[in-house]
Amino acid sequence: MAPTRPEPFWGTPTSTLDWCEINYEVSPFIAEFWNTLSNLGMIIPPLIGIYQIMRHGLERKFVLTMASIMLVGVGSWAFHMTLRYSMQLLDELPMVLGNTVLIYQLSEIRKSAKRDINWSMIVLCAAYFVIFCGLYLSLKNPVIHQVMYGMGVLVVLSLDLRLVNFNQCRTCTKLLSAGFFLYTFGFGVWNIDNQLCSQITELRSQLPTSLRPLTQLHAWWHLLAGYATFIHSLFIIHARGHFFKPRVKIVPKWFGMSVEPNYRVD
């Protein structure tokens, strides 16, 4: 007689979405093991970024940028671990909130740190987030989240391109290009996972156990999108260095940054 699989720790899923990974296949305590574990890619890099920001005495608002990425990672971890609707919201709402943080910082990036807070922009971003929450919580349609999050991404990208055109900075261009490539590739992988789940599941069943995690495409989306967003945060911090007085050069690393006081256009 085959061994009986333990009862799922978190009970029957209540989320409106359930991804291609087989539920509770690895552990009775984690609904989607690989989709959960991969969120470390959205938690560890921002933690390093926060440490570097504090260490180098950069503007504290960049802590908020890194924290917004980490919040998405923590929420996504909780969502995929439990597949509960409340945890799904903890994943999806911070994604849109994080977009508003990026939109505000990019729109204000050329202004002096001593300038007054742009309350008009804050109210506009807050209104967008509140409207999204109202629509999404009342209708509970995942398409609403996907559309409004996608709209925010497009606004962020337009502000990115405007900034690159203004700065004419090679490092900015490299960072933005790398982040865009990783994010776009991850988005493509996400769609493949959604559209070809049955074929991927069949392929996975024919592979050795050690190779099966490599076919968890939604997990790859977490890793790629998480690191791409981290690179984007480094792009913003580096670009902001062009407007410091006295100017400083922020040198991005693979996981973090260093600061050089002697500024030069690069």
Image (cartoon, rainbow, N blue to C red):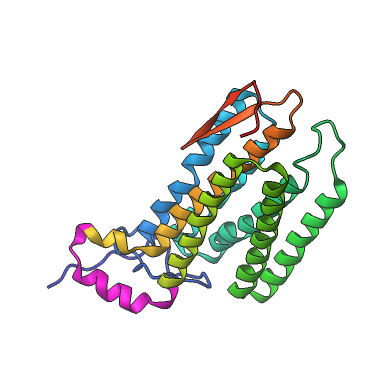
- Nearer to us in this view, 34 or 223: 223
* Quarter occupied by the C terminus: top right
Residue 111 vs residue 147: left or right? Answer: right
Q: Is residue 180 above or below residue 232?
A: below
- Nearer to us in this view, 253 or 128: 253
Q: Is residue 85 something one can see in this rendering? A: yes
Q: Position of residue 50 (x, y in %)?
A: 57, 34
Residue 245 vs residue 33: left or right? Answer: right
Residue depicted at x 42% and y 55%? 36
Residue depicted at x 65% and y 58%? 96
- Nearer to us in this view, 106 or 74: 106
- Determine the main secondary structure of the stretch shown in magenta: helix
Q: Which residues are magenta?
A: 194-210
Q: Position of residue 35 (x, y in %)?
A: 40, 59
Q: Position of residue 215 (x, y in %)?
A: 31, 64
Residue depicted at x 64% and y 21%? 262
Q: Position of residue 229 (x, y in %)?
A: 55, 49
Q: Is residue 70 something one can see in this rendering? A: no
Residue 28 vs residue 261: left or right? Answer: left
Q: Is residue 196 above or below residue 249?
A: below
Figure quadrant of residue 30: bottom left
* Quarter occupied by the N terminus: bottom left
Q: Is residue 261 above or below residue 32?
A: above
